[in-house]
Image: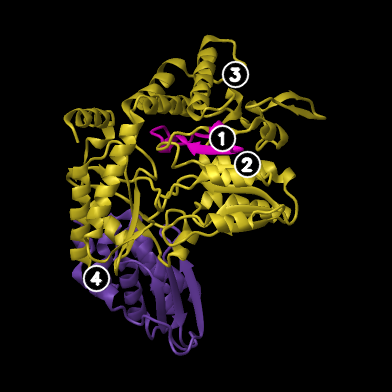
Amino acid sequence: MVSELYKRELIELSHNPYHFGKPKKIFSSHETFNPLCGDKITVYQSIDPSKAIELWFESVSCIICSASASILMKHSEGMDLNDGLEFIKEVQNAINDGSLCNHKFPKALHCLEEINNYPSRITCATLPWKTAFELLK
Amino acid sequence: MNTKKKEVLNKIRDEFPILDQKINGEDLIYLDNAASTQKPKSVINAIKDYYENDHSNVHRGVHTLSVRATEAYENARVKVAEFLNSPNVHQIIFTKGTTDSINLIASSVTNLVQKDDEILITSMEHHSNIVPWQELCKRTGAVLKVIPINKNGELLIDEYANMISSRTKIISIVHLSNTLGTINPVEDIIEIAKSHDVITVIDGAQAAGHLPIDVQKLDCDFYLFSGHKIFGPTGIGVLYGKENILNEIDPYQFGGEMILKVTFEETTYNDLPHKFEAGTPNIAGAVGIGASIDFINGLDRDLAHQHEMSLHDYALEKLEEIGGVRIIGNASNKSAIISFVIDGLHPHDIGTIINQKGIAVRTGHHCTMPLMDFYSIPGTVRASFSIYNNHSEVDKLIDAIKLAIKMLK
């Protein structure tokens, strides 16, 4: 059911996403388009990533993408660069293969688990992670 | 609607077997006709019959199947020529589709275009009528210029008249916008272009299935469309061209079929239309497009137009009653396409939710990203109607949109 995809928790996250907006200081940024729908996301790293990850984002995007970005911003915050890159890569893979409910991932990601039943929407969920990886790699 | 008309429309709908199915447990409501129309039994059967009885490679074969396949392929060309009122059958080139047709022209006219020449397109073009011209400009040093539109999605003809000059070489314009539904005044546009000796290319991808096309009356140099948007198969399209220009421009691709004589030293190209049809063509596709033209010719086209516009008007009225809905494209001369956005909601989310109710609409930029930029939106929800849709489907669309708003806000 589509109501399982659009969980209230996911919708709420998209309405008030964490670290949405341009940070006061920008160390680096990366912009990506979703060619399927024209959505745009810019991910900012506000401090030197060799110290820690601190991401912000701006986007014109759907509920799935905004909520996914919000989870990324919150749960990568403070991570060491290498750990952060590994985390981002693992989540991207888990979104693609439907294994987000793995215990090693934050519980917040579970609200995206249904996305695997909507193949045309997987890119919406992975776009922020892909953009962050390109920014930090 | 009177009973007789209703019976006619129901009978037409019965010709489309794909519509008789459930999607997510609901009756399929197919409102994505601007992306691709569904196929009537006659088209499906024509392709099946061709493969079951007549298939071989075309031209040059002396055996019976090759003769039959050649006849089927060339008969389809005759049907297309009549459909467009082309003065000659050999002015009809089969391509892969409208995109391929535009690429053919943009590639083949390279020898006619020089540095600082200007190519005109409009703000409402599909990417397929932008990118090939950008590439031509890169190759030749020509300049791409864009005719603006107003917020209703109508072309600014006065601006166009001011933009055209002795430097203008080509104008390539969409007849009927896939995103806005705008029907452009191509007759006036061509007339102005002709007074400046400008080559005119008309992208008829959306128009060919909805408007009667007469290339001689239009007096355009090129007219293009795709099979799959006129109830035919995918992978087949048409390029109509004026004979003198088709003879003047270079072939697009090279190899078998398009030659008269080959030696290791030189090659002589074949006559029209074969000069532009290198390799084994899409024979079954041509048979399919021929059958789709038979299907359209069998329709009461006035009734089809009235019915589609009645669905458009009804849907528009119902959509405008929903708070937060903004219609994108309000041209005074429109076809049965409605693009819209809803405040605070993303088109993809709406599309996903209404799909749960069995409703197929297209969401996104519709391959018109510059047009989306013009309206400062990432995309729209687009409902596009065909002869087989009905008013009860519009009611279900409206209910599903209301449900999506309720769920997502």
**Residue labelled with disc 1:** B239
Where's residue B107, x and y in %? 66, 44
For mark 2, what is the residue? B105
Residue A7 magenta-highlighted: no
- In this rendering, which labeled residue sits more in front, label 2 or label 4? 2
Q: Chain of mark 4?
A: A
- Residue B335, given in percent of the width and then of the height, sits at 38, 45
Q: Secondary structure at mark 4?
A: helix
Chain B colour in the picture = yellow
Q: Amino acid at mark 3?
A: His
Mark nearer the viewer, 2 or 3:
2
Q: Which chain is purple?
A: A
Does label 1 lie on the same chain as label 4?
no
Q: Is residue B396 left or right of residue B136?
A: left
Task: Identify the residue under disc 3.
Answer: B59
**Magenta stretch, residue numbers:** B215-239
Q: CA distance from mark 2 to mark 4?
A: 47 Å
